[in-house]
Image: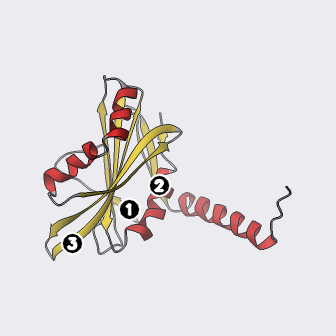
Amino acid sequence: MKIKFKPVCIFLLVFTSLYQQSALSSETKKYSNDHLGFEVSYLDKWKTASTPSNPALFIKRESSVDPVTILIAVANFTGNKKKLMRELRDKPELLATSFKRNFPDTELVGHRDTSLAGVPAYVIDVKFTAVTENGNMAISAMSLTCIKNKKLYLIQFRAPQSIFENMLTEVQLILATFKFL
């Protein structure tokens, strides 16, 4: 079977690829930490912020009125990698438990296998209600877990449910730059 591409389709594919490359090359910052074993680039629209839990990296989207964040935490891991990843697949609610401690109404809405910089990873999607200074806010979150070089990497992206899908594309561009060192 021969597949024919219309010139418009080819143009769109090339344009999208070039747009993504330029979006991340002309207006980016890079975070690199040899000790924690990773680097990632992020758009200028994102700014580092501090949190009491002191993750490896915590960035907030500056131009957004709503709280949009990415947290990257790293911990040493000495357990059985295959066993843990199997448990996460079999019982994704285990990952949702970390959200339930702070947000009791957390609901697991999805889970799937993925990869991070070519390394197998696992994702859960949750939604919950957060109390903000402006009242209650419906939040969606994506939590990615990956193990590499005896380190467990946890990446969480949170945004109001009303803009989560729009922000996800930008977060995926950022995660595409993630590299293990």
Q: Amino acid at mark 2?
A: Ile
3D distance between C-alphas at marks 2 and 1: 10 Å
- Residue 137, disc: 3
- Residue 86, disc: none
Label 2: element kind? helix
Residue 45: % across, % down: 41, 66
Q: Amino acid at mark 1?
A: Trp
Q: Nearer the viewer, residue 83 or 116?
A: 83
Question: Can residue 172 be seen in this snapshot?
Answer: yes
Residue located 19% across and 66% down the image = 129
Q: Nearer the viewer, mark 1 or mark 3?
A: 3
Mark 3 or 2, nearer chain start: 3
Residue located 36% across and 27% down the image = 83
Q: Amino acid at mark 3?
A: Met
Label 3: element kind? strand
> Does 176 sit above or below residue 63?
above
Q: Nearer the viewer, mark 2 or mark 1?
A: 2
Mark 2 or 1, nearer chain start: 1
Residue 68: % across, % down: 32, 65
Mark 1 or 3, nearer chain start: 1
- Residue 73 quadrant: top left
The residue at the far right in this view is 2
Residue located 81% across and 71% down the image = 7
Q: Which residue is mark 2?
A: 174
Q: Which residue is mark 1?
A: 46
